[in-house]
Amino acid sequence: MEPGTSSSTDDYVEIIRKLPLYLRLAYGTGHVLNDICASMWFTYLLVFFHLVLGFDPTLAGVVLLIGQIADALVTPFVGFQSDINDNFWLCRYGRRKTWHLLGSFMHRNARTASVLLRDVRMYQVASVYMLTRLFINLCQIYIPLYLHESLNMPATSLAYIPLTMYLSSFLMSLIIERLNTKWGRKVAYSIGALLAICACIWIQFGNGDIYVKYQIYVVAVLLGSAGAIMLVTSLGVTSDLIGKNTESGAFAYGIMSFTDKLSNGLVVMLIQYLVKHCSSDYVSYYYRDILTYACGVSAIFALLMILYIKPFSRTTVFDTLRNDDDEGFIETPNAVDGNSSSNQSQANIH
């Protein structure tokens, strides 16, 4: 085994190559702007349009849906284009860095994309990622409205509670790698999903002064920690999906993002439409039930889906960083035409 790598026999644990700290910092800072914009967009957009500008709830949902649809349509296109090696002078800066420089996010091979789109496992992984993002984004969107409408907490709580969620996500992100490498993707994701389900149940039954003053912060910690574990682990499963086939990597992430953005926009639009038809007595409980049932069901289905996904073959996935003959999870056209029986064997479920 190469120096600087470690392995595990658990499901979904890839061979991990340790990158230098400066490279990890460089890649990490590249996502800062995206995360800042997303956190503001999901956490405060509906609050601003609904409570400050007095928009009709449905119209506020339409605004968010338009942004999500635009994002969903552009993401796969940018991913596909950034995989292409172009000799245009601007693209010589780097096929990824050029798009990043322009403020946006395959090798020209239609067969690679078509093989990916025909693989049922890609849709399974996309479902896990979509449900994960649905849980996280719905929490970010409706926690402020839940605090204001259901719990009647002061305006300062709209800053403190989301901050608690983000801080717990940050702290949990420091140990997620160990969870994945020691126990595997399925176990790590299950831990996050169970934390999410516990938080949703707590929201449903939480009430009283003690809950509003103290327990709501524990719920925020559970939501933040669960979201971090589920998101990072689902991204790890996506990287397992790509394997060594980096020529289609951006397209794969584009497909994941497409399902994420479109589903989030449609669900939020539906939720905002239904709130108009609630009785005045039920409105104060509406956002509580959204966090309980919409977020809880998303976590449950995501957990069931990742448990349903069959373990990948260790020959074609886990050793992709040290075996030149392995092609990763996304099979290339040649691999599809002539798979060996060894490449078709599945690892035992632990």
Image (cartoon, helix red, strand yellow):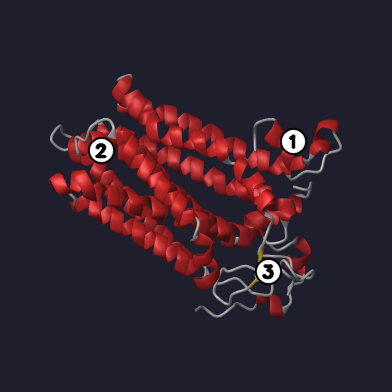
Q: How packed is label 2: few (under 14 Cα within 10 Å), some, or many (20 or more)?
A: many
Q: Earlier in the sequence, mark 2 or mark 3?
A: 3
> In the rendered view, would you say 310 is above or below 291?
below
Q: Which image quarter: residue 138?
A: top left
Q: Callout 2, which amino acid?
A: Leu
Tell me the amino acid under the disc marked 1.
Thr
**Percent of width and height locating residue 55:** 32, 21
Crowd class of label 1 (few under 14; some 14 to 19; many from 20; radius 10 Å): some
Residue assigned mark 2: 147
In x, y percent, where is residue 228?
45, 53
Judged left or right of residue 29, residue 168 is: left
Sequence-first disc among 1 and 3: 3
Which of the numbered marks, if any, corresponds to residue 325?
none
In depth, the one of 119 and 183 nearer the eye is: 183
Comes first in the chain, label 1 or label 2: 1
Residue closest to the eye, 31 or 292: 31
Q: Which mark is residue 98?
A: 1
Looking at the image, which is closer to me, 6 or 237? 6
The image shows residue 245 at horizontal and vertical percentages of 72, 58
The residue type indicated by label 3 comes to Thr
CA gap between label 1 and label 2 equals 42 Å
Q: Is residue 88 left or right of residue 327?
A: right
Q: Position of residue 210 (x, y in %)?
A: 16, 48
- Seen as rendered, the residue at the extreme top is 53
Q: Which mark is residue 5?
A: 3
Q: Disc 2 vs disc 3: which is toward the camera?
A: 3
